[in-house]
Amino acid sequence: MVKKTLEIYSVELSGTKDIDQTDKGDGKEKYRGLKNCFEPKKNHQKEELKKELDLDDHKLSIKELEKKYGTNIITGLSSTQAAELLAQNGPNALTPPKETPEIIKFLKQMVGGFSILLWIGAILCWIAYGIQYSMNKSSSLDNAYLGCVLALVVILTGIFAYYQEAKSTNIMATFNKMIPQQALVIRDSEKKTIPAEQLVVGDIVEIKGGDRIPADIRLLSVQGCKVDNSSLTGESEPQARSSEFTHDNALETKNIGFYSTTCLEGTATGMVINTGDRTIIGQIASLASGVGNEKTPIAIEIEHFVHIVGGVAISIGILFFIIAVSLKYHVLDSIIFLIGIIVANVPEGLLATVTVTLSLTAKRMAKKNCLVKNLEAVETLGSTSVICSDKTGTLTQNRMTVAHLWFDNQIFIADTSEDHSNQVFDQSSGTWASLSKIITLCNRAEFRPGQESVPIMKRVVVGDASETALLKFSEVILGDVMEIRKRNHKVAEIPFNSTNKFQLSIHKTDDPNDKRFLLVMKGAPERILEKCSTIMVNGQEQPLDKSTAEAFHTAYMELGGLGERVLGFCHLYLPADEFPESYSFDVDTMNFPTSNLCFVGLLSMIDPPRSTVPDAVTKCRSAGIKVIMVTGDHPITAKAIAKSVGIISANSETVEDIAKRLHIAVEQVNKRDAKAVVVTGTELKDMSPEQLDELLTNYSEIVFARTSPQQKLIIVEGCQRQNAVVAVTGDGVNDSPALKKADIGIAMGIAGSDAAKNAADMVLLDDNFASIVTGVEEGRLIFDNLKKTIAYTLTKNIAELCPFLIYIIVGLPLPIGTITILFIDLGTDIIPSIALAYEKAESDIMNRKPRHKKKDRLVNQQLAIYSYLHIGLMQAVGAFVVYFTVYAQEGFKPSILADLRVEWENGNVNDLEDSYGQQWTWYQRKYLEWTGYTAFFVGIMVQQIADVLIRKTRRNSIFQQGLFRNKVIWLGIASQIIIALILSYGLGSVTALNFTMLRPQYWFVAVPYAILIWVYDEVRKLFIRLYPGSWWDKNMYY
Amino acid sequence: MTKKEKKSFNQSLAEWKLFIYNPTTGEFLGRTAKSWGLILLFYLVFYGFLAALFSFTMWAMLQTLNDEVPKYRDQIPSPGLMVFPKPVTALEYSFSASDPESYQRYTEDLRNFLKPYDLEEQKNLTACPDRVLFVQKGPIYHACQFPLALLEACSGVDDPEFGYSRGNPCILVKMNRIIGLKPQGEPRIECISKSENTAALSTYPPNGAIDLKYFPYYGKKLHVSYLQPLVAVQVSFNASSSAVKEVTVECKIDGSPNLKNQDDRDKFLGRVVFKITARA
């Protein structure tokens, strides 16, 4: 299956072109195949896919094309032909993916998670009410109300979750936005402007600078046309187009213009060869929407947690339903018990709390330049174990910068940091003076005017990348370059071209006493050296002998080996007698010398790593995260950057390095000795998935170079096969499948295309790799803190559940009502549980391994047991003490409470005797019961204060963590107390809420138990710290 | 796909088996015998401690209580009214005068209830002064006599069937005991028939009066053999009415400003409504 998948991607790689109009059926077949690429497929289909690889519109001559598409490049299609084709192939637009209707999404929220349990509870309530009503028309509405309250809780939390989900946008939206509105087409020998949607295969279209290309077109005639293919291939430089076939690969050849890319300059005429979904971009779009969004790890964890809690709720519920029935309880009563047990067991507020917690972290991350689109992705970054990172722009600054200089037989290092502030190389030599002059003068790049206040490195420059680098370099060192150029008036110039491989200009010098012209030249080093007969050393010209030439070669190789682009510089002062001031230079006839020049130096440039990246990579490494570089760049450059940022660490070698060091053939090297490896796209293409797996497991430092962006998808899948949680960075449209496939897709905010941003779960606003590390840290913290939140929330479930169990078995008057439980779950507990999200890390979370997807669960056995059976039980005991106190002090001693339930609840018994001989009416008892609810509620609340405090840490003492460092916790505690006070004293008279005004002293009855909880947990943590790895540690650390 | 699932099912079965008992490590349900032992010991100690702590706090709490009087009485400021005999379900009495079986339960109930009110039983009780509160300082608290004769026709002395056999049943109305309650004014039970013409009501003692001498009540422990004052209501159906006679009676405490008889929520606070159905 995996193999098939690979083949499908390779379809993408070679750029499937041209679906013949007669071949429409196959086309459809293919797209279905792409969408379901993970399903087993029949063989013949596979072959069809392969056949389509042979499509070769870019190879065909114009005559052949005309024949194939039944068109004429002068007259175009006829209107009738076009209409027929349009009817046959459909409009030239991307099919939007089948969207889940909003109502379905909404309903999904309504039945997801705990909702289904609560619905069951609500329905049971209504059934119970129905039965009661049918037996007694005047029966109390309590159960009907409770059903409504439960339904309301589900609906409100559902709306909340739906709202959160609705925020994340649809990937197809931007693909649609990219569709050009109008196209200039030749039909019936006339130029017409038609909506681009109506284009058909065979149409002849004209495009000009600024247009978006309306479909995939084969270019027929071109005038200086350049296109921006960055959204498709990731190449950021403008690509020249021509009508000639230049490359076998459709993506690389110059005579194809791709749908949705932009024409930057020039004009062109082309024939439409693919429309709509059959265009390259259409295929990627369908591939991206075909790649299922993987469930985020936190979603899996929460599902796991819901299963645990739901399982406990249902099994206890059913168990006690059976017990109740066998204790001869009425079935109706048993149903009501069941509802109580469900409500007590389900942490109604928890999922909303988790959402809020995640969005708080998302906000925090946004401040640190990580914009999270999909809330759950917040945590995913924390569990990431592999990062597949782009090179350009993410690891590097995305601009050419002068890195090294070579003159006076010496290599100098230039400062490549973001602001260039610290140039430390020796600038006293005469050679440097000459070299700097050449750099300044032999350069056509210019700053755009009006940027005087902008820092030099941030100014906008008109010119290509290398010239820009040189301009900025010289501006930083020498000051106002434009002024220097003005003083050295340029009299002639030959711009760089690919045949000459050099650039030359002739200037008057700024020395008024020197009437000579200065000829400066730069270009490919070997070309420059050929033209030289002397070399400048320490400001003096010396003949260029063999040893200096050798020194040049060594330096050239060394700089080239660093993956840098090397340029040579030379000059010549033209003798004043031969070239007087009035001499007229002619660049066409070259009436000036271009040989026997004086070689001055070399200068090498690289897109340097961002200064924060090496540190970030080290952090990733210590955090157990493998950083894999995936780049389209040259292997040498990729390796150099990987080395300089630490992706390949200083002391590890590739197989090739070892071979070189030992002077043996690459094949003889023991592959196990190498820790690092550089794999090119071509090698990757020939690898089986098994080989890729082996590669990914055997090497700890991997660089993929020359990869086509679609190969990223294969790499991502390879990593995921190793059970890794994979983060992928990307910026192009072509990256969107990989971004979607990744556990967390990270798009670049500045360089990224909209499609990439849409496919991604997270957008890096500053395109900086270091921001990912901050994200990882936040993600890990939130995982820890969610554990604390859940432990906190689960604890009181036992204190809410025990009353029901005891009520059923012992027959006490009900200690806590269902509504009261809801007030704890959705009232007092909410803010403290959110406050735990603000807790700081207990130790350096960046020093531990990423969590194991399957082993390090959010809710593990220890957490559940400790919360339920230790703290939860203590809380239950404490709350019962408050309950018994209230009843005893009002006249019902614990001894007579047992088995009192039936009489207590009988509305016809209005003279129930208490322990003192007093008699109570039903309503008086009911009021006492509500006082009991309030007392139990307060008991739980007081102990939950202790609970939230102990949950601040899992291992350290609270005093180590700092009791007051997290102020929000105290806000949460205050909210807890205030809500409880309002419920008791403010709303105590609203009978429907079942709260009464509680005597002040009852608020303190549970305090000793709260203190006990604190002490107990401190002891637990102390033993964990004292005896790591012991039985205690294993059983008590969650 | 199916093949894979099957495999994983077999795998999980094997995993389960291994989980239940792992022969290599000797683990049973994921723990070794030693680990189980430690766990059980731990919980024994932990829960033992919790139980002890609970018992201790409960004991300490009970020490704060007074044996004679509950600490607070705020939740029962005013007494409820209740009728006797206790009907089976709701407050509906139904009997047939001609069928002794149908009312035997009621009369037996009444006889049992009135046993403490026997002259013999009341011998040792105090004859208290009428129409004043019988406030006592202790340490011995006396109970006042409640002569059965006050109930006249419903005393069961003359008519052991309490009027049921004649179709004029007696119902006793009593006020809930509340420790320390001192009614003001001259409390009396007033009963009215809601269906006016079907039956006439007579109350004993006359006017349904409740003598103040029975108040205040000092609690079960101190006020031994305290007798609650009673009021009897006898329903006399009109001869003219049909074979099945029905009457709904509402009784209220009246004449005492501090005894409430109107509460929206508590239908038994100072009042009681019951229905009598008598067949021929």
Image (tube, helix red, strand yellow):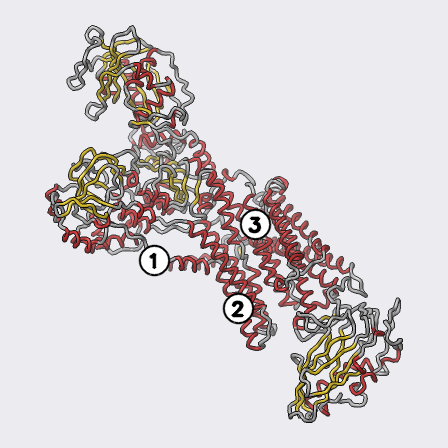
The residue where tag 1 is placed is B1
Q: Chain of mark 3?
A: A
Q: Could you tell me which secondary element the residue under label 3 belongs to?
A: helix
Instruction: Indicate left or right for A985 with A202 as reference.
Output: right
Residue A235: image location, x then y, percent: 29, 36
Using the image, determine if residue A974 lies above or below residue A672: below
What's the amino acid at mark 1? Met
What's the amino acid at mark 3? Ser
Q: Residues within 10 Å of mark 3 (few under 14, many from 20)?
A: many
Kindly indicate whether the residues beneath marks 3 and 2 are on one polypeptide chain: yes
Instruction: Indicate left or right for A679 with A220 as reference.
Output: right
Q: Residue at x 41, y 43 (%)?
A: A762
Q: Chain of mark 2?
A: A
Gap between marks 1 and 2 measured at Cα: 39 Å
Using the image, determine if residue A496 lies above or below residue A273: above
What's the amino acid at mark 2? Leu
Name the one closer to the observer, A205 or B119.
Answer: A205
Residue A852: image location, x then y, percent: 46, 46
The residue where tag 3 is placed is A833
Can residue A183 be seen here? yes
Q: Could you tell me which secondary element the residue under label 1 belongs to?
A: loop
Callout in the foreground (3, 1): 3
Name the one closer to the observer, A835 or A179.
Answer: A179
Badge 3 or badge 2: first in the primary sequence: 2
Instruction: Indicate left or right for A752 with B59 as reference.
Output: left
Residue A61: image location, x then y, percent: 12, 41
- Mark drawn on residue A701: none
